[in-house]
Image (cartoon, rainbow, N blue to C red):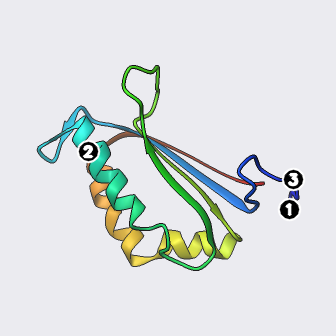
Amino acid sequence: MNTKTSNTGVNGLRHIVMWTLKDEAEGLSRHELMLKARDILLQFSNLVPGILLFEVGIKTEGQDCTCDLILNSVFENDEALKAYQNHPDHQAIKPFMKSVVVQRSCMDFWI
Protein backbone atom coordinates (compact mmCIF):
# COMPACT_ATOMS: atom_id res chain seq x y z
CA MET A 1 0.00 0.00 0.00
CA ASN A 2 1.18 3.47 -0.83
CA THR A 3 1.66 5.56 2.32
CA LYS A 4 1.72 8.88 0.49
CA THR A 5 -0.73 11.45 1.84
CA SER A 6 -3.43 12.61 -0.54
CA ASN A 7 -4.26 16.27 -0.94
CA THR A 8 -7.44 15.61 1.08
CA GLY A 9 -5.40 14.25 3.97
CA VAL A 10 -7.31 10.96 3.73
CA ASN A 11 -5.34 7.82 2.93
CA GLY A 12 -6.91 4.58 1.78
CA LEU A 13 -8.40 2.92 -1.27
CA ARG A 14 -9.79 5.68 -3.50
CA HIS A 15 -12.84 4.73 -5.58
CA ILE A 16 -13.81 7.21 -8.29
CA VAL A 17 -16.78 6.73 -10.60
CA MET A 18 -17.82 9.19 -13.31
CA TRP A 19 -21.02 9.05 -15.30
CA THR A 20 -22.33 10.74 -18.43
CA LEU A 21 -26.11 10.75 -18.38
CA LYS A 22 -28.73 10.62 -21.10
CA ASP A 23 -30.34 13.86 -22.25
CA GLU A 24 -33.64 12.49 -20.95
CA ALA A 25 -34.71 9.31 -19.17
CA GLU A 26 -37.31 8.19 -16.66
CA GLY A 27 -39.33 11.30 -17.62
CA LEU A 28 -36.55 13.57 -16.33
CA SER A 29 -34.14 15.98 -18.01
CA ARG A 30 -30.39 15.45 -17.73
CA HIS A 31 -30.15 18.09 -15.00
CA GLU A 32 -32.98 16.47 -13.04
CA LEU A 33 -31.28 13.07 -13.44
CA MET A 34 -28.03 14.52 -12.09
CA LEU A 35 -29.82 15.88 -9.02
CA LYS A 36 -31.73 12.64 -8.40
CA ALA A 37 -28.64 10.45 -8.77
CA ARG A 38 -26.63 12.77 -6.50
CA ASP A 39 -29.32 12.68 -3.82
CA ILE A 40 -29.49 8.89 -3.93
CA LEU A 41 -25.71 8.47 -3.81
CA LEU A 42 -25.33 10.89 -0.90
CA GLN A 43 -27.54 8.58 1.17
CA PHE A 44 -24.74 5.99 0.93
CA SER A 45 -22.08 8.09 2.66
CA ASN A 46 -22.29 5.97 5.82
CA LEU A 47 -23.62 2.77 4.27
CA VAL A 48 -20.88 0.52 5.67
CA PRO A 49 -18.03 0.87 8.17
CA GLY A 50 -14.73 1.91 6.60
CA ILE A 51 -15.91 4.77 4.39
CA LEU A 52 -13.40 7.54 5.05
CA LEU A 53 -14.47 10.08 2.41
CA PHE A 54 -17.61 10.23 0.27
CA GLU A 55 -18.22 13.12 -2.12
CA VAL A 56 -20.73 13.36 -4.94
CA GLY A 57 -20.63 16.20 -7.43
CA ILE A 58 -22.51 17.31 -10.51
CA LYS A 59 -20.96 19.25 -13.34
CA THR A 60 -20.86 23.01 -13.32
CA GLU A 61 -22.88 24.42 -16.18
CA GLY A 62 -20.85 26.43 -18.65
CA GLN A 63 -17.65 24.49 -17.95
CA ASP A 64 -16.08 22.08 -20.42
CA CYS A 65 -16.98 18.85 -18.59
CA THR A 66 -16.89 15.38 -20.10
CA CYS A 67 -18.99 13.82 -17.32
CA ASP A 68 -22.17 14.86 -15.55
CA LEU A 69 -21.77 13.19 -12.17
CA ILE A 70 -18.83 11.99 -10.05
CA LEU A 71 -18.39 9.89 -6.94
CA ASN A 72 -15.09 10.51 -5.17
CA SER A 73 -14.69 8.18 -2.20
CA VAL A 74 -11.99 6.66 -0.02
CA PHE A 75 -12.31 3.35 1.79
CA GLU A 76 -10.24 2.01 4.66
CA ASN A 77 -9.44 -1.23 2.80
CA ASP A 78 -10.54 -3.67 0.09
CA GLU A 79 -13.07 -5.26 2.41
CA ALA A 80 -14.84 -1.95 3.07
CA LEU A 81 -15.10 -1.22 -0.67
CA LYS A 82 -16.43 -4.73 -1.36
CA ALA A 83 -18.96 -4.38 1.48
CA TYR A 84 -20.12 -1.07 -0.04
CA GLN A 85 -20.37 -2.50 -3.56
CA ASN A 86 -22.27 -5.60 -2.39
CA HIS A 87 -24.60 -3.81 0.04
CA PRO A 88 -28.29 -4.29 -0.92
CA ASP A 89 -28.91 -0.53 -1.00
CA HIS A 90 -26.01 -0.06 -3.44
CA GLN A 91 -27.23 -2.95 -5.56
CA ALA A 92 -30.73 -1.42 -5.63
CA ILE A 93 -29.52 1.76 -7.38
CA LYS A 94 -27.91 -0.13 -10.27
CA PRO A 95 -31.07 -0.59 -12.41
CA PHE A 96 -31.83 3.15 -12.16
CA MET A 97 -28.27 4.14 -13.00
CA LYS A 98 -28.11 1.72 -15.95
CA SER A 99 -31.36 3.21 -17.30
CA VAL A 100 -30.05 6.80 -17.24
CA VAL A 101 -26.33 6.41 -18.01
CA VAL A 102 -24.69 6.72 -21.42
CA GLN A 103 -21.15 6.09 -20.19
CA ARG A 104 -19.51 5.08 -16.92
CA SER A 105 -15.83 5.23 -15.97
CA CYS A 106 -14.35 3.88 -12.75
CA MET A 107 -10.92 3.77 -11.16
CA ASP A 108 -9.68 2.41 -7.83
CA PHE A 109 -6.21 3.17 -6.46
CA TRP A 110 -4.36 3.39 -3.17
CA ILE A 111 -3.34 6.77 -1.76
Name the quarter where the C terminus is drawn: bottom right
* Numbered label attached to residue 1: 1
Residue 25: where, in percent of width, then height?
A: 18, 42
Q: Which mark is residue 4?
A: 3
- Residue 93 is situated, as x and y percent measured from the top left of the image, at 33, 63
**30, above or below 38, in the image:** above
**Which mark is drawn over residue 33?**
2
- Work out whether residue 56 or residue 78 is closer to the camera in this orientation and state it: 56
Judge whether 97 appears above or below 20 on screen: below
Q: Residues within 10 Å of mark 1 (few under 14, many from 20)?
A: few
Q: CA distance from mark 2 to mark 3?
A: 36 Å
Q: What amino acid is labelled 1 in the image?
A: Met
Residue name at image x 66 percent, y 76 percent: 79
Q: Which mark is residue 46?
A: none
Q: Tag 2 or tag 1, which sits nearer the N-term?
A: 1
- Answer with the quarter of the image where residue 12 lies: bottom right
User: Which amino acid lies under the numbered mark 2 shown in the image of this protein?
Assistant: Leu
What is the secondary structure assignment of the residue under circle 3? loop
> What residue is drawn where x is 52% and y is 71%?
84
Instruction: Tell me whether circle 1 and circle 2 mark residues in contact (CB < 8 Å).
Output: no
Element type at marker 2?
A: helix
Measured Cα–Cα span from mark 1 to mark 2? 36 Å
Foreground residue among 90 and 36: 36
Badge 2 crowding class, 10 Å Cα cut-off, few under 14, some 14 to 19, many 20 or more, is many
Front of the two marks 1 and 3: 3
The number of discs equals 3
